[in-house]
Image (cartoon, coloured by chain):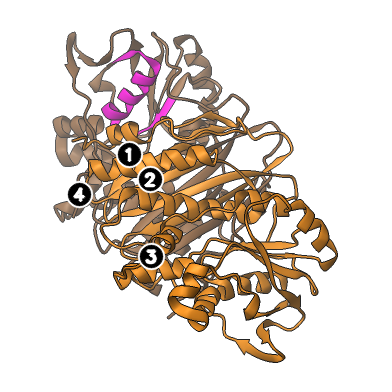
Chain colours: A brown, B orange
Amino acid sequence: MATDEFELIRHYFSELGCDRSGSVRLGVGDDCAIIAPPHDRELVVSIDTLVEGTHFLPGTSGDKVASRLLGAALSDLAAMGAVPAFFTLALTLPEVDEAWLAAFSGKLAELAKQHAVQLVGGDTTRGSLTLSVQVHGWTAVGKAIQRSGANVGDRIFVTGTLGDSKAGLETLLQKTVGEHVPYLQQRFFSPEPRLTTGQIIADYATAAIDISDGLLADLNHLLQRSQVGAMINPAELPISQTLYRWVGEKRSREWALTGGEDFELCFTVPALLEPKLAWALRHHDVAVTCIGQITDSPGIVLAEDGRIWPVEAGGFNHFTDVK
Amino acid sequence: MATDEFELIRHYFSELGCDRSGSVRLGVGDDCAIIAPPHDRELVVSIDTLVEGTHFLPGTSGDKVASRLLGAALSDLAAMGAVPAFFTLALTLPEVDEAWLAAFSGKLAELAKQHAVQLVGGDTTRGSLTLSVQVHGWTAVGKAIQRSGANVGDRIFVTGTLGDSKAGLETLLQKTVGEHVPYLQQRFFSPEPRLTTGQIIADYATAAIDISDGLLADLNHLLQRSQVGAMINPAELPISQTLYRWVGEKRSREWALTGGEDFELCFTVPALLEPKLAWALRHHDVAVTCIGQITDSPGIVLAEDGRIWPVEAGGFNHFTDVK
C-alpha cells in the first residue's frame, strides 16, 4: 500500500484529462503549474468543496464522488459561458483506500477527458474525507456572463429539469426502492455541467447563475446583484416525468423551487433576443425553458392563474448535514 | 450568529487583500472570479491544504492558522520566482466560531495586503476543520523557475535557517517552556514566504523548490526532476542560534536536514553566476547560504572533513498525525 503522499499522487493523479486550449505549459509535479494565457482571453476561476457527511453519505463510492465533485465545479464555469481548461484537486483522506482511489481517479479521468479539462496540480493530506476542486476556464475578453446584468423585462430561463437532485438525495436518505431511483440518484451523483449551453447563451444572456442552492435561493443572488426582482410561473417549471410520477405536482414543484444541487443554469435574456436565442439553440439537446421575467420590485413573486404570492428565498444550506 | 454560509463568507471574506498587477476584473461574489492576464505574463498556480490534527494541533488560534496557511501557499509562488496576484479559499468548519473566524480573517487580510495578493473567491462548508488555499502569481514568459533545470556543477543554496519549524512543532508537542519557544513557534506558525528572494534569483537559478517536507526530501525531488545528484556539506547548513542553543549541533543538523515546513527556498545556480547572484543579493535582508553542489551521481551524499556518506531521503510525511 502506497502511504507516501508523493507516490499516491503520482500513481493516481498524473496526466489526467486534457486541455484543448493548449495553455498548460507545465502540469503536475513542480511547486506550481505554469499556464500560458491564450491571446485575447480572460481567465475565470472557481473553487468547490465536498465533505463526506455534509454533501454525500459516508460510504459513497469513489466514482460517484468524482462525478459529483467535477460536475458541480464545472457548472460554475458553465454559468460564466466559459470553456474549461484546467483544474487542481485538494484531497483530504482518512486513509489510503486503493479501491476507492482507483474508482475516484478513474471516473475523474473519464470526465476530465470528456470535458477537455486537465489536472495540473493538487495536494493530498490526511484527515476526514474532504475534496476541493478549483476549475479554470477561458472566455473572450469581456464576455463572461455575470450575475449582475439582468434588466427589467428580461425573460428568465432554466436548463434541463429541476428538483431531481433533491429527490435523488431523498431516495438515498429514505432508502427508497422503485424504478424512479436510478434516474434520480444519477441526477444527484452525476450532475451534467451545462457547458455547451453556457457557451451558446453567452452571446444573448444578460446574467446567469448555476442552481446549487435551489432555484429561489440562486435566482435571489442574481436578483440582488442585478438590483431587480422576478415573477415566476410555477406551472412553467420544468419537472421530469420521473419526479412528477414519484411525488406528484405539489411536492415536485416545491423541490423544483427549493431543492439544491440541480446544477442547471438559470439565466436572463432580453425579450427582443428570445427568437435569436431559440434559433441558436435549435439543434441543442438540452431543454431551455422560460419560467418568468425580471421585474422592478425587489424579491420573487410566484404568479399562476391570476393569483400572485411573494416567496421567501429558501434553499439548501451547506451547514445542514446528511449524516 | 451567522449560520448561513453566504452571510458568513460575505462578512469575513469580502474585499480582502489587493492585487498590484491589476489583473482582477471581478472578485468574490459571482459563480467565478474573472481575471484579465497581463500582457507577456504566464500564470503559476498552486493549491495547499491544512488539516487540524495533521498540520496543526486542535485548538490553534485563527491567526496562527491563517499565517501558516497563506505563508506555506505563497512559498510555492516564491519557489517559481513569481509575483503573487490572487487566491481562493476553501474553508471547512465544524461550526461557526465567530471569534476564531475574526482572528483568522483578520490575519489573512493583514498578510494578503502585505504580500499584495487578493482573495477572489471561496467555498465555505461544514465538516472537520480543513483549509485549502489556491494561490496564483505571474512570471515573465518562460521565466518561472522549475525543479528540472539543475546541472552538474551548479551550486546549491538555501535561504534563511533550517530546522526551526520542526523545533517549533516539538516545543508544542513537548509543551516546552523557555526563551527559545517564542522564536521557534513563530517559525512554525508564521513561515515567511521568500517571495522577493525568489524574484531576485529567477534571473540566475537553474532550478528551485521550497522546503516543505525537509531539505533532503525536497532536494531529492529537485534532483529527480533534473536527473542529477548532490553533495551537501552538513557544516554549511544554516542553523539559527536559538535552535543550536536549545538542542546542540547533532540534533539541529538532523532537523535542518529532515525537519519539514521550513518554507525556505532551495535553489541551484551555475558556479559562474555566483558572483552576479551575490551582487544582486547585496542589499537583500534574507540570508542565502551555499550548502553544496550538483553532481552526476544519483541521490545525495553528505561530505564533511574528508568523510563522505550517502543518505536516504527522508522528510515530513503528511500522513503522520500531530494529534
Residue B180 coordinates in the image, percent (x, y): 41, 66
Using residue A162 as the reference point, say whether residue B14 is left or right of it.
right
Residue receiving disc 4: A321
**The one of B175 and A297 positioned closer to us in this rendering:** B175
Whether pointer 1 and pointer 3 mark residues with C-beta atoms closer than 8 Å, the reply is no
Query: In what quadrant of the picture does the C terminus of chain B appear?
Result: bottom left
**The one of A186 and B220 positioned closer to us in this rendering:** B220
The CA span between labels 3 and 4 is 45 Å
Whether residue B270 can be seen here: yes
Residue receiving disc 1: A262
Chain of the residue under the numbered disc 1 shown in the image: A
Start-end of magenta stretch = A208-230
Marked residue nearer the N-terminal end (1 or 2): 2
The CA span between labels 1 and 3 is 57 Å
Residue B145 placement: quadrant:
bottom right
Say the numbered circle drawn on residue A191.
2
Whether pointer 1 and pointer 2 mark residues with C-beta atoms closer than 8 Å, the reply is yes
Name the residue located 52 percent from the left edge and 69 percent from the top edge.
B241
| Three-letter amino acid code at the position of disc 1 | Asp
Does dot 2 land on a helix, a strand or a loop? loop
Does dot 3 land on a helix, a strand or a loop? loop
Q: Nearer the viewer, mark 4 or mark 1?
A: 4
A210 in magenta? yes
Chain of the residue under the numbered disc 4 shown in the image: A
